[in-house]
Each structure stands twice: as C-alpha cells, then as structure tokens.
Image: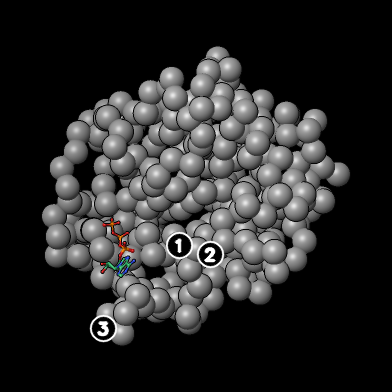
C-alpha cells in the first residue's frame, strides 16, 4: 500500500521528527483512525511549559479535539496558543503532561502521532518559485507516498481547495488568499485525521479570511477532519463550533459555543470572552460577511 514505507527523506516533512523516531506509520493506520469512533483525535492532558523560571507559558492545560469538529483555540496575545502549537507539532517538548493523537502518545510514538496531523503554520511553508502542483507533489513524496499515490492525492487536494485551475502557476504569482489555500491543500496531501492551523488568517483581507474560514469548516464537516484552529478573533468561530478559551497559559473554558456562553453567564461569545479573559475582542467585519 502506498505510504507504508516512508522514504528517508520523509523525515524532513513532518514537524518535529528526528531520525531516532522510528519508521513512518502505514497510511492505512491513519485511515483506521479516521474511521473510528468519536474518541478525541487530539487530547491535551495537564500540559505545562515554561520558557523561563519566572513564568509558565502553559499551566496544566487540558482539552480535547473530537473528530469532525472545528475546535477554536481562542485567546488574546500571549495566551499560550503558539506555544501549544509548538508542543503539538513537537518543535518543543512538553515538560509535564501528555499529548495524545488518535490515542498515541506524542512523546512515545512521535512518528505515528505526527503522521496523523496536517499543519498550517502562521508563516508560509510553500516554495514561491515552484508551481502549486510541484509544491504539493514534493510534500506528498516527503510524506512517503509513491508517485502514483502522490499524484492522486495532489489532484484530490487541489480540487478540494478549488485551486486546480492554478496548479501550473508558480506560487509567487498567486494572491495571499490563494496561497493560504495552497498551504491548506499541502497540509492535506498525506490524508491526516487532524488539521492544525496557527492563526491562518493573519495578514489576509476580509474576503480571503472568510474564504479560508468557510473552506476549513467545509473540510471538517465533509471529510470528518478534526480541526484545531488558533485565533484571537471571535468572528472566525461559527455557532456550531467548539471553543477552548485560553488566557495566560490557563484553559478558562471548553465546550460547544453555546455551552461556553451559558456557563459564563454571558449574552454571546464576545461577552463570554470578556468575562473569561478580562479583555475585549478585537473588532472585525468578518461576521457580517460569513
Ligand atoms: N521564545 C520565547 N521566549 C520567551 N518567552 C516566550 C517565547 N515565546 C513566547 N513566550 C512567552 O510565552 C507566553 C505565551 O506566548 P505565545 O506566543 O504562546 O502566546 P500566543 O497566544 O500565541 O500569542 P500571540 O497571539 O501573540 O502569538 C507569553 O508570555 C510570551 O511572552
């Protein structure tokens, strides 16, 4: 089966992997995870992390990301969102607590855990001088897919993100919004069960932000993807989403939007955010457009 034997070069494509982490998992293992029950795809359990002795950037943070749901990690600047992303993608190692991906402990079975996730970082990772198709094909091959399977997945991802007509264009020639869609397509070429996005709309105009927000919600629903989307913007969260509110390294609330709002005794999510963090939401015009 394609993907069973990851090429050695595949190590570079997976965030946080080192050559000591053992062989790559089979593609079919990830599909089994995808088809399985409503057990959390990502579980953060009592995770703490500090950059210095003075202050914890994360303090016993715990929450889950279920399959087929859009879970927003919402918090103001400095809340610990990027730190958490860095721990989940294994750029840093959690000093205490556990991170489980489809039940696999990230510290004990990093290859399987990392292979199950697609990541869209804040900063672009696609090569502007390659075409869209070349970028995706390169990523698929680095994840260990053989050429025929890689071509099929690239074609699927391009079509899923509505960028097939730009497949032969150099990434450099695309607008910011289209580039983000290419980043998204690239994150999906290896058929992950978990999609993680770290403030993916930073720097985009309102229409492009709306486009990405809707594309990711659609992927979540149709592909049964578990999505973890970090943001400090409430208007990127839709009423049917789950939300985890984080502030100064502490998880303040977790649940369906409706539940978080009700538990905070708030009128709406913006009000709940104010009550939970003591901060007002940044203003944005996105909601009016969604
Ligand atoms: N490399 C670093 N060295 C020292 N402290 C850091 C470092 N990166 C983050 N911090 C601190 O850790 C805490 C959490 O920061 P983090 O970047 O994870 O928050 P965030 O929620 O992602 O914020 P933002 O939305 O501004 O990116 C903050 O107090 C921040 O100042």
Kindly tell me whether mark 2's CB lies below 8 Å from ligand 1: no
The image's mark for residue 54 is: 3
Percent x, y for residue 236? 32, 42
The image's mark for residue 86 is: 1
Percent x, y for residue 123? 40, 45
In the rendered image, the quadrant that contains the N terminus is top right
Outermost residue to the bottom = 53
The answer to whether residue 134 is above or below residue 260 is above
Q: Residues within 10 Å of mark 3 (few under 14, many from 20)?
A: few
Q: Residue at x 25, y 34 (%)?
A: 286
Please indicate whether residue 270 sits to the left or right of residue 71 in the image: left
Q: Residues within 10 Å of mark 2 (few under 14, many from 20)?
A: some
The image's mark for residue 90 is: 2
Kindly tell me whether mark 1's CB lies below 8 Å from ligand 1: yes
Where, by quadrant of the figure, is residue 114 drawn?
bottom right
Percent x, y for residue 263? 28, 65
**How far apart in space, not on screen, are marks 3 and 1 (Cα)?**
20 Å
**How far apart in space, not on screen, are marks 2 and 1 (Cα)?**
6 Å
Which callout, 2 or 3, points at the residue further toward the start of the chain? 3
Which callout, 3 or 1, points at the residue further toward the start of the chain? 3
Q: Nearer the viewer, residue 66 or 76?
A: 76
Q: Is the Cβ of the residue at disc 2 closer than 8 Å to that at disc 3?
A: no
Outermost residue to the top = 165
Q: Residues within 10 Å of mark 1 (few under 14, many from 20)?
A: some
Q: Secondary structure at mark 2?
A: loop
Is residue 69 at all visible to an observer of this figure?
no
The image's mark for residue 15 is: none
């Amino acid at each position: 089966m394609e993907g069973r034997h990851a090429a050695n070069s595949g190590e570079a494509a997976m965030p946080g992997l080192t050559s000591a982490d053992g062989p790559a998992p089979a593609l079919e293992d990830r599909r089994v995870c995808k088809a399985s029950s409503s057990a959390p795809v990502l579980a953060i359990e009592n995770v703490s992390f500090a950059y210095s002795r003075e202050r914890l950037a994360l303090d016993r943070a715990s929450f889950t990301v279920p399959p087929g749901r859009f879970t927003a990690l919402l918090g103001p600047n400095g809340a610990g969102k990027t730190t958490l992303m860095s721990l989940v993608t294994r750029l840093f190692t959690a000093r205490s607590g556990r991170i489980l991906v489809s039940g696999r402990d990230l510290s004990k079975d990093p290859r399987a855990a990392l292979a199950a996730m697609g990541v869209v970082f804040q900063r672009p990772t696609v090569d502007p001088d390659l075409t869209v198709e070349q970028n995706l094909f390169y990523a698929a091959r680095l994840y260990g897919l053989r050429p025929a399977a890689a071509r099929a997945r690239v074609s699927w991802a391009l079509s899923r993100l509505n960028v097939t007509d730009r497949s032969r264009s150099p990434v450099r020639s695309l607008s910011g919004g289209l580039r983000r869609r290419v980043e998204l397509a690239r994150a999906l070429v290896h058929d992950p069960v978990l999609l993680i996005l770290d403030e993916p709309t930073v720097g985009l105009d309102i229409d492009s932000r709306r486009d990405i927000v809707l594309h990711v919600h659609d992927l979540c629903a149709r592909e049964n993807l578990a999505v973890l989307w970090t943001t400090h913007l409430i208007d990127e969260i839709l009423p049917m989403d789950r939300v985890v509110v984080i502030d100064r390294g502490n998880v303040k609330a977790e649940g369906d939007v409706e539940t978080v709002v009700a538990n905070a005794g708030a009128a709406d999510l913006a009000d709940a955010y104010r009550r939970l963090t003591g901060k007002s939401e940044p203003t944005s015009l996105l909601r009016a457009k969604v």
